[in-house]
Image (spheres, rainbow, N blue to C red):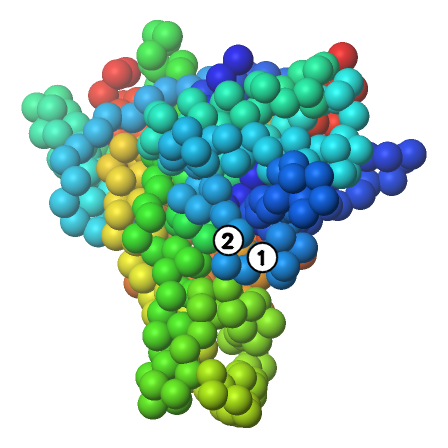
């Protein structure tokens, strides 16, 4: 299970088939007009029906305070019940590696308080789980020396792995998918001379549907005017300029912070890993062509040929990797 | 158990993946300054220079590595180097690199023969690649360090 700040993804085996559940990590509560009791909605339905009050409680990657921890607990229980996840299960969580003790403690309470995972619970870094499907069909990644980069909504994570052991873990909240969404919203406003204001959710939807380094085409959308009527507008550079900047900033962080640290502390793994494919995972890695662009720019920055790989579905990769580990754990029970 | 993803157990993970425990040797750290490539090169040159200076008194002649040091440290270092060569390029490329080092006068034919045999005892890597200049530089550092222990 990948508990992401934007999306939660679960891979579960049922009747010999692997099922993938993908939902927005959000929750909305409302009062039932008939009974007066509190009702809870989660995921896409909550985001669509209660756009004003919906809460993304893992917005920073972890539930930071008691209120968000409580929401996370409700979200988790709703999800488990709705998806009928069995209690007698082995659960492997893919979790971002963020230095936030309070947040981790809260998440730990949520996970340990949930009824699932009676058999076994484990958690691994998202960047490790995400690289497993990128590096092979099974658990080949654990036998490799390689670098993994997770381009998430709220964090850019990087880590070198040497036969499963993590080396020089790096994480920054300065280069994120959420920041790209904010910049898209501003850039669209600028591109339409202030006539169009979109929220971050719309900006994220534009990014997910239209951003591409391969075949981006300007697109049009329509907004309803406050005084009635509608306004049609075209988005062109407002979308790809922020995405382009993101890649430059990510390359800068990886080359000059993460890799410098790795080179200084672990010379042999650095030498080994840079000559091998770097695994790219996370929501931002889903943008068509970003792997090639990142590879090209990182090669240029480091003045050496770098190869970058990603799983077929980078947004599902962390859950897929976690599931492969869970399968082995279940076999060993 | 806690859920901190940084506290997972790599030994359990390797066991789940059916992978043998590697021998781990930590490398020394230097102060952060230059770019990644530059600082690695700087550190390697610094270590080579120190080894060369130490060896200069005894006369530095090719082939640099004539015997494998018969100590725990020497054997561990040798394993570390053989593992590095194999992980970079697999068995065939590692043996080609060793032949190249013999031609350069870095190692004796007997050492080339011995280490080529050791290469076969390690599994082939998932992703093999050709050797590049940085790999040879690191190999030279291994050779110089082994020679300093001999």
Picture quarter with the C terminus of chain A = top right
Q: Residue at x 36, y 69 (%)?
A: A183
Residue A163 in sight in this render: no
Locate residue B50 relative to residue A6 in the image: left or right: left
Q: CA distance from mark 1 to mark 2?
A: 6 Å
> Considering only vertical position in the picture, is A108 above or below B47?
above
Mark carried by residue A244: none
Residue A81: x %, y % from top left: 74, 33
Which chain does the residue under circle 1 lie in?
A
Classify 10 Å Cα crowding around label 2: few (below 14), some (14-19), many (20 and above): few
Q: Quadrant of residue B29?
A: top left
User: For mark 2, what is the residue?
Assistant: A53
Picture quarter with the N terminus of chain A = top right
Which chain does the residue under circle 2 lie in?
A
Q: Quadrant of residue A76?
A: top right
Disc 1 element = loop
User: For mark 1, what is the residue?
Assistant: A50
Of the pair A251 and A9, the residue shown nearer to us? A9
The mark total stands at 2
Q: Residue at x 57, y 76 (%)?
A: A210
Residue A115: x %, y % from top left: 68, 20
């Amino acid at each position: 299970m990948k508990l992401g700040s934007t999306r939660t993804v679960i891979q579960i085996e049922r009747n010999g088939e692997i099922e993938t559940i993908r939902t927005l990590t959000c929750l909305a509560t409302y009062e039932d007009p008939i009974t007066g009791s509190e009702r809870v909605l989660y995921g896409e339905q909550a985001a669509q029906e209660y756009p004003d009050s919906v809460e993304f409680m893992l917005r920073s990657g972890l539930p930071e305070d008691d209120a968000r921890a409580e929401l996370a607990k409700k979200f988790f229980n709703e999800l488990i019940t709705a998806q009928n996840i069995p209690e007698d299960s082995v659960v492997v969580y893919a979790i971002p590696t963020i230095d936030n003790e309070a947040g981790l403690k809260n998440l730990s309470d949520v996970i340990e308080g949930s009824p699932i995972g009676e058999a076994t619970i484990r958690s691994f870094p998202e960047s490790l789980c995400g690289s497993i499907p990128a590096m092979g069909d099974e658990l080949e990644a654990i036998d490799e020396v390689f670098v993994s980069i997770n381009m998430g909504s709220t964090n850019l994570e990087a880590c070198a792995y040497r036969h499963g052991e993590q080396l020089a873990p790096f994480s920054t909240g300065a280069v994120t998918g959420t920041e790209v969404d904010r910049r898209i919203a501003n850039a669209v406003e600028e591109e339409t001379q202030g006539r169009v204001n979109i929220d971050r959710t719309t900006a994220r939807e534009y990014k997910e549907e239209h951003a591409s380094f391969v075949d981006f085409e300007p697109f049009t959308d329509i907004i309803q005017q406050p005084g009635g009527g509608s306004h049609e507008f075209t988005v062109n550079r407002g979308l790809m300029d922020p995405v382009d900047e993101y890649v430059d900033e990510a390359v800068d962080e990886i080359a000059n912070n993460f890799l410098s640290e790795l080179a200084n502390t672990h010379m042999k793994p650095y030498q080994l890993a840079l000559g091998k494919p770097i695994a790219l995972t996370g929501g931002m890695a889903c943008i068509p062509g970003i792997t090639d662009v990142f590879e090209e720019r990182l090669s240029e920055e480091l003045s050496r040929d770098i190869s970058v790989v990603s799983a077929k579905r980078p947004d599902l990769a962390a859950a897929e990797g976690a599931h492969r580990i869970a399968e082995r754990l279940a076999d060993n029970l | 158990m806690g859920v901190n993803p940084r506290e997972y157990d790599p030994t359990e993970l390797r066991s789940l993946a059916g992978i043998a425990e590697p021998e781990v040797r930590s490398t020394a750290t230097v102060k952060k300054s230059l770019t990644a490539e530059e600082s690695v090169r700087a550190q390697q040159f610094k270590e080579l220079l120190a080894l060369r200076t130490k060896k200069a008194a005894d006369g530095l002649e090719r082939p640099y590595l004539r015997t494998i040091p018969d100590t725990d440290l020497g054997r561990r270092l040798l394993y570390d180097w053989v593992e590095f060569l194999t992980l970079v390029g697999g068995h065939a490329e590692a043996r080609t690199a060793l032949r190249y080092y013999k031609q350069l006068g870095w190692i004796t034919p007997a050492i080339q023969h011995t280490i080529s045999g050791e290469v076969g005892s390690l599994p082939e890597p998932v992703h093999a690649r050709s050797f590049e200049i940085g790999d040879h530089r690191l190999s030279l550092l291994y050779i110089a360090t082994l020679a300093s222990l001999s």
